[in-house]
Amino acid sequence: MPGKPATRLYVPDDLAAGLSVGLAAGQAHYLRSVLRLAAGAELALFNGRDGEWQGRIDGIGKGWCSIALGEAIRPQAAEPDLWLVFAPVKRARIDYLVEKATELGVSELHPVRTARTIVERVNVERLQANAVEAAEQTERLVVPRVHPPETLPALIARWPAGRRLVVCDERGHAPPIAEVAGGLGGTLSGGAAVLIGPEGGFTDSELDGLANLPFVNPVSLGPRVLRADTAALAALAILQALAGDWRETRGGGRQGL
Amino acid sequence: MPGKPATRLYVPDDLAAGLSVGLAAGQAHYLRSVLRLAAGAELALFNGRDGEWQGRIDGIGKGWCSIALGEAIRPQAAEPDLWLVFAPVKRARIDYLVEKATELGVSELHPVRTARTIVERVNVERLQANAVEAAEQTERLVVPRVHPPETLPALIARWPAGRRLVVCDERGHAPPIAEVAGGLGGTLSGGAAVLIGPEGGFTDSELDGLANLPFVNPVSLGPRVLRADTAALAALAILQALAGDWRETRGGGRQGL
């Protein structure tokens, strides 16, 4: 396999050998004015479907850039289908949450309004841009989709068959998350989701209603209080470690240490 | 047990019924000028040793405040002895890392310089203040101690007998973290530590040297690249879930859902 270029960009276009891809104006500006790249410079492109490809700038100007695709660098690999469903938190924390959830391998991000949700406005475009940037910088080949906000009951009403919903219950009497995650099966078969409440927590009636749903597993995250964003990242990491694709090594040439 | 006051403050003093405690000038300013509390107001105090206590302001002025202790709110509970050993990262990320590590229940924070560590200055006082604030806001009764930075070899040279060191090896061929964490034993008996490298990663010789130490367990954190701070939080959450005190429920009156 050819070496990896330092710059990786997400594009929506199809990627295949011999194709030429036009970048968005913002990306062209970034390459030309921030990185100061010129025609002939190499970079990598990915689209979340076709793996990662070598590309070479074959034309660049103010607000436009054309990339000629070369060889494939990495094939697209299957990833666990793990959603994060979360009540929006304040700006710095929600940006961090989207970045970290992207690194931890979530497939979709669903902001939901709960009874005690205080943050009402969600800038879906900004969150989607955060997810793109996190994927670009951490070599992920998938960019999780950020959905528009809706109420928790609306999302529950159209919940997909077969997908488990792991609800972080801050009241402390649900089973430990490791116990539940260990029973979810290989690479989260059928899909799974983590649900995190707002800073003020869920109401008792929300939690009791959720617990009665056949696809819900309430879980506890230990004896200490966690902020909403911390709980989200902890739950995602534990699900990946116990039921997702962290159970296998990355499979380099060497084995063991 | 009496109800919990909304304001919790960490103090270094011994706490017991009938004692009177003088606050630091910064805390007195916070109570008087930010929260606008006056004599008679109730708050909670903890010191990391004696549990949490009700207190009542019995005198407050510019830069001073005296608190009369009332009843005990919560006893001090034993916590897992889990260190985070980390190469310092940039300012916003290191603040976030200390906050989150405190919520996740670490007992000590050890900044270390590795071969590729770029950030040289560490403001130990600011990090300690972050840890205090995170403990105050999330009802934790322990404030992790932030140690002065040292080189990784210096810390390894005085490594305590019996403490496991879980090294996050980004090369991808170490055993999965869940496999290793599952074998560490109940509430991290004997103590454990997570070691996270700098943004540029460990060198091969650092990782090979660490792997030869009898107290080291190299682990893999899945197939995707994680930023250093993400790797730290993921590893801490997984260790707490599988070998720490997240394996038990908090034990409220109700059981199960």
Image: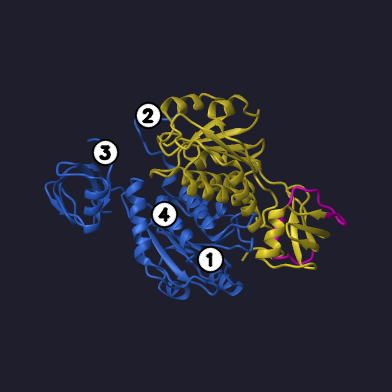
Chain colours: A yellow, B blue
Q: How far apart are marks 1 and 3 (CA)?
A: 40 Å
Q: Name the residue under label 4.
A: B99
Q: Distance between the residues labelled 3 and 2?
A: 20 Å
Can the viewer see residue A78? yes
Label 4: chain? B
- The mark that comes first in sequence, 1 or 2, is 1
> At label 1, which amino acid type do we have?
Gly
> At label 2, which amino acid type do we have?
Arg
Q: Position of residue B140 (x, y in %)?
A: 34, 48
Q: What element carries label 4?
A: helix
Q: Which of B246 and B1 is in front in this view?
A: B1
> Magenta segment: does it hold B222?
no
Label 3: chain? B
**Front of the two marks 4 and 2:** 4
Q: Is residue B79 above or below residue B113?
A: above
Q: Name the residue under label 1.
A: B197
> At label 4, which amino acid type do we have?
Glu
Q: Distance between the residues labelled 4 and 2?
A: 30 Å
Q: Mark 3 points at which residue?
A: B4
Q: Mark 2 points at which residue?
A: B254
Label 2: chain? B
Q: Is residue B166 above or below residue B79?
A: below
Q: Is mark 3 on a helix, strand or loop?
A: loop
**Front of the two marks 1 and 4:** 4
Outermost residue, front side: A62
Q: Position of residue A221 (x, y in %)?
A: 45, 42
Binning the other alpha carbons within 10 Å of mark 2 as few (below 14), some (14 to 19) or many (20 upward) gives few
Q: Give the range drawn in magenta.
A: A1-20
Q: What element carries label 2?
A: loop
Q: Evaluate if marks 1 and 3 touch, with contact meaning CB atoms under 8 Å apart.
A: no
